[in-house]
Amino acid sequence: MIRRVLLAVLLALATLTTFTSAPAYARVCALGYHCVTTYYSDSSWTTVVGAMYEDCEGAESRWGSRTIYKDFVETPC
């Protein structure tokens, strides 16, 4: 009986952890690179809703909104 309850609790926790995991963060721009992250409205990747630019010195500029639909381009300085 205790094993069944323990198994049920462990399965519930595993399911809860799977569905409530933290969102993926944007990639970090490497030293000596400039990077552009473009954010799109949905999975069709047609409407740009925001962007983030990181220059070679590490300064950032952003506009619009961030979404999970993003494209990351990293280019050496």
Image: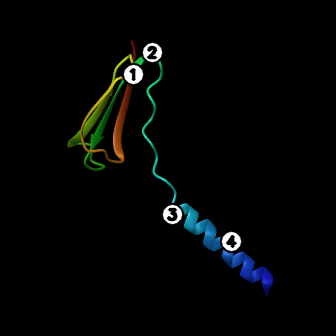
The label nearer to you, 4 versus 2, is: 2
Task: Between label 1 and label 4, give the one nearer the viewer.
Answer: 1
Residue 35: percent from left, percent from top: 36, 25
Mark 3: which amino acid?
A: Phe
Residue kind at label 1, given as amino acid type: Gly
Tell me the mark number nearer the camera, choosing from 3 and 1: 1
Residue at screen point 68% across, 78% down: 8
Mark nearer the N terminus (3 vs 1): 3
Give me the C-alpha separation between circle 1 and circle 4: 44 Å
Residue at x 56% of width, y 68% of height: 16
Q: Write the residue at 55% across / 61% down.
A: 18
Reading the chain from its start, which is encountered first: label 4 or label 3?
A: 4
Distance from disc 2 to disc 1, alpha carbons, whole Å, reads 9 Å
> How far is the residue under mark 4 from the one under mark 2?
46 Å
Please identify the residue farthest to the top as the structure is shown.
Answer: 77
- Residue under label 1, please give it: 58
Compare marks 1 and 4 and give the one earlier in the sequence.
4
Residue ID for mark 4: 10
- Helix, strand or loop status at disc 3: helix
Give the mark toward the camera: 2 or 1: 1
